[in-house]
Image: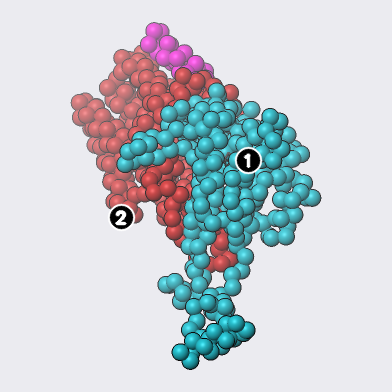
Amino acid sequence: MHPAPSIILFTTLSGLGYGLAAVLGLGLLDASTLSVKIAHLAAPVMIAGGLLSSTLHLGNPQRAWRALSQWRSSWLSREGVMAILTFVPLMISAWFSVIEGRYLPAAGLIGTAMCGITVFCTAMIYASLRSLQAWNTGFTPLCYLLFAAAGGFLLAAVAGYSSGTGGTVCAAIAALFVVAAWIAKHQWWTRLRTLVPLSTPESATGLGNIGHVRLFERPHINDNYLTREMGFKVARKHALKLSKIAVIAGGAVPVLLLVVAMLSGVGAVTIVASVLAVGFYALGLVVERWLFFAEARHAVMNYYGG
Amino acid sequence: MTLLPSSPTPRKLGLVIDLDVCVGCHACVISCKEWNTGGYGAALSDQDPYGADVSGTFLNRIHTFEVLPEGGQVIGEAGEARIVHFPKSCLHCEDAPCVTVCPTGASYKRAEDGIVLVDESKCIGCGLCAWSCAYGAREMDLAAGVMKKCTLCVDRVYNETLKEVDRIPSCVRTCPANARHYGDLGDPGSDVSRMVAERGGYDLMPEQGTRPTNKYLPPRARKPLAASAGSAVLAENTDGAKGFFAWLDGMLDRI
Ligand code: SF4
Ligand code: SF4
Ligand code: SF4
């Protein structure tokens, strides 16, 4: 699949935003401090930024509101509905933190749950497509949820360390989630790289009983929408290299930085280390999301020799 | 509503495509584009139509495959390879994933005859339905920003202003080889259903669980090239000649 920058940006940014909002909803941090107030505002901004970038690839964005109507069958519609509903508890929590300087458990916990559901809906858009065998697995939502949680605790660690309380707790949990997320992703990759293709040129044409089927001529000599959108292929050796880069940047480095922060306990080092951890983690996540698309082979490629 | 019809549609209108007959002339591709660019919904645009990088929206495309008998690494080693021309348009699936993934309700399957359509005034051009279709039957029109797909020529088949003979899809009407057939695949007595039963018509990618309505008829077993050698006209002998040709043969030998 073609790795469209707008979708990669959307899933990365909104994943981090939902993660942060969900962790804030747990009330581990002191809601009256300036950095936690900023975090309460930053989370919805990241989510909204992600949502806006996802509308960039629409052919007719002015009708985007219609996408809220088919929640009974469509995961994309469910995601849209949940995304909007989730803003309600998030804004209430933000209000209580920023204006009243306190944590409201009801709004916080409901917000946490709804953030989780929204991320799950996003992941299910991909995981429900049978035509994309790489994505069509329960590991897809598991990875999305774990990555969102890891990102959320990482950002919360920054807020905690800069506010002076709660940083170490968040950093410790963040490290656990980062490790768990990459273990799940490793399983996802192992599955992908050992897949027996569900559909083949033989099943796509029904000619397998005559022999081995191979494309002789494309319908047209130039590309079309399908080959541009779905014909993207990343060389296996590059994919392996990139996945290592993703694991190191998004897994190993952040965990090391978190350990540094936890060992220092307080002070500027903790803030610098946790900020750097977030930066590296986001970089690793972008590479991971790029591969998520680039490595997925669409069944239609059986008709296009790809 | 992008829920699929709750009960099987009473009629299952669709196409039967005969891979034994298709000669790969692309006439149906052109007639489909011609009819549908002026008919249902937005025109089927082309991008850079007179330039080097021309591309455009098509609802029907012909692929050509080479089929090599098992065991052969090179053509002719294990048997004769054959070329199969392969027309492909929307299969109007019964369990159409393109319909259920649509967030806006633009994609729908008609309860009365099973035709899968896009209501372009609702489509936001998100492209998810094209992702969900394993068959590559949906293409986004880049000029209009809406999803295009085969309409089964719904604006012809029910169109009483057309002559009866023209109330079939444009591609079916056009095919000079008669490789495309249109009818009700829900009615076991229809011509298309009988054709499918007789010829062993099959589904494409049944493992995708989409239950296509359209069926494909397999290429018939081919006579090996060697078996046709007896009738080869190029042979350098006149053994079986009779009558005038025997006389001419004799005369020419003598000259
Ligand atoms: S062929 Fe593709 S577009 Fe047509 S109904 Fe089936 S899934 Fe939908
Ligand atoms: S591109 Fe249009 S028809 Fe397809 S899923 Fe999106 S809104 Fe529905
Ligand atoms: S039925 Fe109509 S729209 Fe569909 S492929 Fe044939 S000509 Fe095109």
Q: Residue at x 37, y 23 (%)?
A: A49
Please give the letter of the chain rendered in cyan.
B
Q: Residue at x 35, y 37 (%)?
A: B50
Tell me which secondary structure the magenta stretch mostly adopts. helix
**Kind of residue at disc 1:** Pro
Magenta highlight on residue A87: yes
Which of the numbered marks, if any, corresponds to residue A237? 2
The type of colouring in the image is by chain
Which of the numbered marks, if any, corresponds to residue A228? none
Q: How many marks?
A: 2
Could you tell me which quadrant the N terminus of chain A lies in? top left
Question: Which residue is denoted by mark 1 in the rendering?
Answer: B169
Return the chain for callout 2. Answer: A
Relative placement, left or right, of A32 versus B68 is left
Q: Is residue B160 visible?
A: yes
Q: Is residue B2 above or below residue B196?
A: above
B204 or B41: nearer the eye? Answer: B41
Question: Can you tell me whether the CB of the residue at mark 1 lies under 8 Å from the nearest atom of ligand 3?
Answer: yes
B126 or B190: nearer the eye? Answer: B190
Measuring from the top left, give residue A88's x and y in whole percent: 49, 16
Same chain assignment for discs 2 and 1: no
Please give the letter of the chain rendered in red.
A
Q: Is residue B142 above or below residue A65?
A: below
Q: Distance between the Cα atoms at labels 2 and 1?
A: 47 Å
Measuring from the top left, give residue A154's x and y in whole percent: 34, 31
Query: Which residues fall within the magenta stretch?
Result: A84-110
A106 or B170: nearer the eye? Answer: B170
Q: Residue at x 45, y 22 (%)?
A: A61
- In the orientation shown, which residue stands out farthest toward the left? A268
- Element at label 2: helix
| Of the two numbered discs 2 and 1 in the rendering, the one whose residue sits closer to the viewer | 1
